[in-house]
Image (spheres, helix red, strand yellow):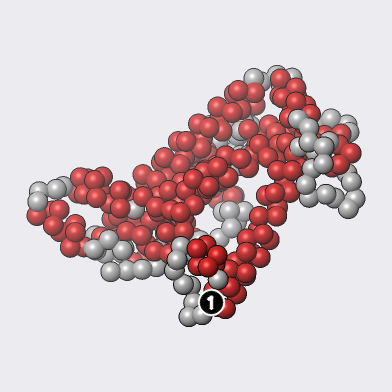
Amino acid sequence: MKKIKKLIGGRRLNRSYGGDTFIITILTIFGVFFAFPLVFNINHAFKPLNEIFLFPPNIFVRNPTLNNFQDLFIMMSKSWVPFSRYIFNTVFITAVGTTGLIIVASMGAFVVSKYKFPGAKIFFSGVIITLMFSPYVTAIPNYLVLASLGWVDTYLSVVIPAFAMPMGFFLLKQFIDTIPDTLLEAATVDGAKEFGIFTWIILPMIKPAWLTVMIFSVQNLWNARASNVIYSEELKTLPYALSQIITGGAVTIARAGVGAAVTLFIMIVPLVMFIFAQSNVLQTMASSGIKE
């Protein structure tokens, strides 16, 4: 029991140690269940070809090798467009799209949350309704709008729609709702303007929320192929180029190891970001529904 108490920081989760043991056991089981795909993919990327097709498959690699990554880099070097160009495209789209989303969503959420104007509730209800629609449902209308604006086959076709992420707006608005109005009124009395209040009070206080939004945005944009709106090879993203490497050639079975390396390569950036910001994600989810 002392180990359990030490594990949870000296605080009891339940009224009894038996309840604490049960809760920790259940959480451990779910943790192992959700971590299994991640552990399997990491090990899969370092398996030689004979272990990849072994049945039943092994979870952990027996003879680790870097051949899969070496083959991946060799295939990268044979691309007629420099592979650094694909990396730049993805990094640029991810950085600009995420930055724009945080700025636009946080400003909009601040106005809707703290300024009572006609139609504010209707607008927020519309945002909530958009959460119900799959991206596949809105793909055709989005394409028609982008085509009419002349943004197809440009960075704007991916970056601008990323600014309008409904989940980001929703999380930021709910988090701003928890900030007392009296705090903003005191800042106004002290002579602070709206932009100063937003920059020096709102943004620092909602840091867990916009870090969470940043993780979601990076995950979406980093994995975006954007092949339906970008056609020029020099503008295509890294996931598209890596998928072409996996499926290219006559014998795709021989590229199974490269495919495992590609999977790890794609997932590593969002994974690292989540590891460093996971406490902020948990705080956002716990506080998003709390109001003053």
Q: Position of residue 121 (x, y in %)?
A: 34, 66
Task: Tell me: 98 left or right of 241.
Answer: left
Q: Is residue 135 visible?
A: yes
**Residue at the (53%, 77%) spot, across then down:** 17
Q: Quadrant of residue 18?
A: bottom right
Q: Quadrant of the N terminus?
A: bottom right
> For the residue marked with disc 1, what is the amino acid?
Tyr
Residue 126 visible in the displayed image = no
Q: Residue at x 45, y 66 (%)?
A: 10
* Quadrant where the C terminus is found in the figure: bottom left
Q: Nearer the viewer, residue 217 or 15?
A: 15
Residue at point 42%, 45% (across, down): 101
Given residues 232 and 216, the one toward you in this image is 216
70 vs 209: above or below: above
Name the spot of residue 187 as percent of width and height, x first.
15, 53
Looking at the picture, how far across and down is residue 60, in whole percent?
Answer: 78, 47
Q: Is residue 268 left or right of residue 281?
A: right
Q: Which residue is mark 1?
A: 17
User: Closer to the camera, 199 or 61?
Assistant: 61
The answer to whether residue 128 is above or below residue 263 is: below
> Image point 49% across, 77% down: which residue?
14
Task: Report the label total.
Answer: 1
Relative to 198, say whether 186 is above or below: below
Judged from the image, the secondary structure of the residue bearing numbered disc 1 is helix
